[in-house]
Image (cartoon, rainbow, N blue to C red):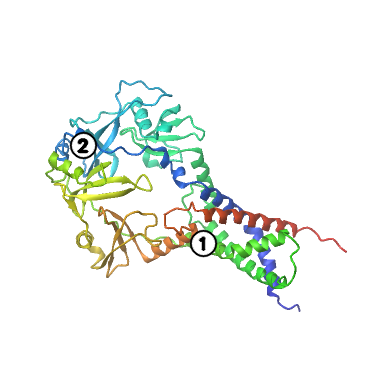
């Protein structure tokens, strides 16, 4: 009876398991290399958009309270959500549509009234005279879309414009109906525009489409790329982890045997061996974190964002007070002023600078209607949570901190966090604007740590476009190819001496 040999067992089973997952490891490495090499903000199309224009308060002749009196509630039951004052492009319906010309548009201050959190119910009024913006024609929608683009894209020729009631799979169905505008660029830049407001809701391009398929291949969800909790990914990741352990055992024996031997050059065996030695720890972290993210589901939490219960705000905001709100902005001209419902009261939110992502505001603060700053304190947050979410129980702690690996990587403002005596949830609020961001649990924080490890986001920027990610993915491609080459060579019959 042959004695059990751990060396032989580990080597043989490492090869057998690699027959099952070797190609998938190469696919993970190649798709990962592609995704980390391209700036995610280019994929999202953030740089396609122009920077927001600062508000011209001299053109604002009406106050929010006057605009509130103009709101039309007749068509359907509406709950007032907020009013935003911002500079928007205004296009005359008489302007012809020139598919290769830059749009001649003027930006003017406009009040955008939101209802029920649904952008399709928005009503827009000119801040100069209170005139509601009429329904847009196709020509106006196209020109408004062009005006929102970076100058390098505004004069780009248009290949196709069509109104879609059913959107392609690359766009979320809640954006329907939308006007699809395809620009004549190398990557077929496609704009999807809300036909009621003329706002670009999302952009797509060929690089995004390739990235989308790379993501689907990466998480082995070949349907819509939404489910990274699928059993096939879990099976492949589990086999990969077992194969990694067996490969580590095999590697330890090889390093022992050849420690005193002279190297015979950079053979395929040596390349694979030394790459495996160098990649062992990061590869192990990558596989284990990926497996955990696939197996463990995030816990559901309570949404306690502040929502008004009345149809319209009760606030007396004369025009000179709104001017005071803008004048108190020490950072320069604001790009947006919002009348928002925060901490169970109506306040002005002054937005001074766009954030890392175009949907985030990096610099913002709250003011009262008279322009006096409203400083958010821990007591404000504690009182609000106690009143708005009594089901969570008594507040245990309220603390202020900067975002970290476990909370909100990439978020640019300080956070006020609340925890509870009878509940394991923690709720995060923006320190500057008192806006509820999200809720967390220990399980969700653990999953956030796994995401940080998997994406190697050690700089805490909320992304994965780091140079070490590119190096790791490139070396993984080489390691996978060298391993597969040795695997296929091992099937050749050996010559008899």
Q: Which of 327 and 114 is in front in this view?
A: 327
Q: In which quarter of the image is residue 381?
A: bottom left
Q: Residue 291 carries which label?
A: 1
Q: Nearer the viewer, mark 2 or mark 1?
A: 2
Instruction: Return the x and y of residue 99 as percentages of the image width and height.
Output: 42, 24
Q: Nearer the viewer, residue 126 or 474?
A: 474
Instruction: Return the x and y of residue 374 as percentages of the image width and height.
Output: 19, 53
Position of 98 relative to 358 (above/below): above
Query: Cβ–Cβ below 8 Å for labels 2 and 1?
Result: no
Disc 2, SS: helix
The residue sitting at the right extreme is 497
Answer left or right for 285 relative to 266: left
Can residue 17 be seen at all in this image of the molecule? no
Position of 345 relative to 16 (above/below): above
The answer for how far apart the CA atoms under marks 2 and 1 are is 54 Å
Can residue 395 be seen at all in this image of the molecule? yes
Quadrant of the drawing holding the C terminus: bottom right
Residue in the picture at 20% in, 43% down = 326
Instruction: Return the x and y of residue 371 as percentages of the image width and height.
Output: 16, 47
Position of 229 relative to 419 (above/below): above
Answer left or right for 4 relative to 81: right
Quadrant of the drawing holding the N terminus: bottom right
**Mark 2 — residue?**
57
Instruction: Return the x and y of residue 160 as percentages of the image width and height.
Output: 45, 27
Q: Residues within 10 Å of mark 1 (few under 14, many from 20)?
A: many
Q: Which of 364 and 383 is in front in this view?
A: 364
Q: Which mark is residue 154?
A: none
Answer left or right for 70 relative to 44: left
Question: Between disc 2 and disc 1, whose residue precedes?
Answer: 2
Disc 1, SS: helix
Q: How crowded is mark 2: few (under 14 residues within 10 Å), some or many (20 or more)?
A: some
Q: In which quarter of the image is residue 416?
A: bottom left
């Amino acid at each position: 009876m042959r004695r059990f040999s751990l060396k032989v067992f580990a080597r043989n089973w490492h090869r057998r398991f690699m027959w099952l997952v070797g190609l998938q490891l190469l696919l993970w490495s190649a798709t990962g290399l592609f995704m980390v090499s391209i700036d995610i903000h280019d994929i999202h199309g953030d740089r396609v958009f122009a920077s927001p224009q600062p508000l011209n308060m001299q053109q604002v002749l009406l106050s929010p309270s006057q605009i509130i009196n103009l709101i039309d509630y007749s068509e359907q039951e509406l709950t007032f959500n907020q009013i935003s004052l911002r500079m928007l492009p205004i296009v005359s319906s008489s302007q012809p549509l020139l598919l290769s010309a830059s749009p001649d548009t003027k930006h003017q201050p406009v009040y955008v009234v939101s209802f029920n959190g649904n952008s399709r119910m928005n009503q827009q009024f000119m801040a100069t005279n209170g005139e509601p913006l009429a329904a847009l024609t196709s020509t106006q929608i196209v020109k408004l879309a062009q005006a929102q683009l970076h100058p390098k894209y505004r004069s780009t020729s248009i290949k196709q414009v069509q109104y879609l009631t059913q959107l392609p799979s690359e766009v979320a169905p809640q954006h329907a109906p939308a006007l699809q505008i395809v620009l004549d660029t190398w990557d077929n830049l496609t704009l999807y525009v809300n036909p009621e407001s003329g706002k670009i809701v999302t952009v797509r391009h060929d690089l995004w489409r390739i990235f989308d398929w790379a993501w689907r291949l990466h998480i082995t969800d070949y349907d819509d790329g939404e489910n990274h909790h699928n059993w096939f990914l879990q099976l492949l990741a589990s086999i990969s982890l077992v194969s990694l352990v067996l490969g580590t055992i095999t590697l330890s024996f090889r390093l022992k045997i050849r420690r005193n031997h002279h190297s015979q050059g950079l053979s395929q065996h040596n390349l694979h061996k030394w790459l495996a030695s160098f990649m062992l720890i990061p590869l192990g972290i990558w596989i284990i974190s990926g497996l955990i993210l696939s197996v463990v589901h995030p816990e559901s939490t309570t949404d306690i964002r502040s929502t008004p219960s009345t149809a319209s705000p009760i606030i007396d905001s004369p025009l000179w007070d709104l001017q005071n709100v803008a004048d108190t902005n020490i950072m320069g001209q604001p790009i947006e002023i919002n009348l928002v419902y925060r901490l169970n009261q109506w306040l002005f939110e002054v937005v001074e600078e766009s954030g890392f992502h175009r949907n985030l505001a990096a610099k913002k603060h709250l003011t009262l209607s008279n322009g006096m700053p409203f400083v958010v304190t821990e007591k404000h947050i504690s009182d609000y949570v106690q009143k708005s979410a009594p089901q969570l129980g008594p507040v245990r702690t309220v603390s202020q901190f900067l975002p970290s690996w476990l909370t909100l990587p990439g978020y640019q403002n300080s956070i006020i966090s609340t925890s509870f005596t009878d509940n394991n949830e923690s709720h995060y609020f923006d320190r500057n604007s008192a806006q509820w961001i999200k809720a967390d649990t220990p399980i969700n924080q653990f999953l956030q740590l796994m995401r940080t490890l998997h994406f190697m986001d050690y700089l805490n920027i909320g992304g994965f476009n780091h140079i070490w990610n590119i190096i790791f993915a490139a070396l993984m491609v080489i390691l996978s190819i060298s391993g597969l080459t040795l695997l296929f060579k091992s099937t050749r019959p050996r010559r008899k001496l």
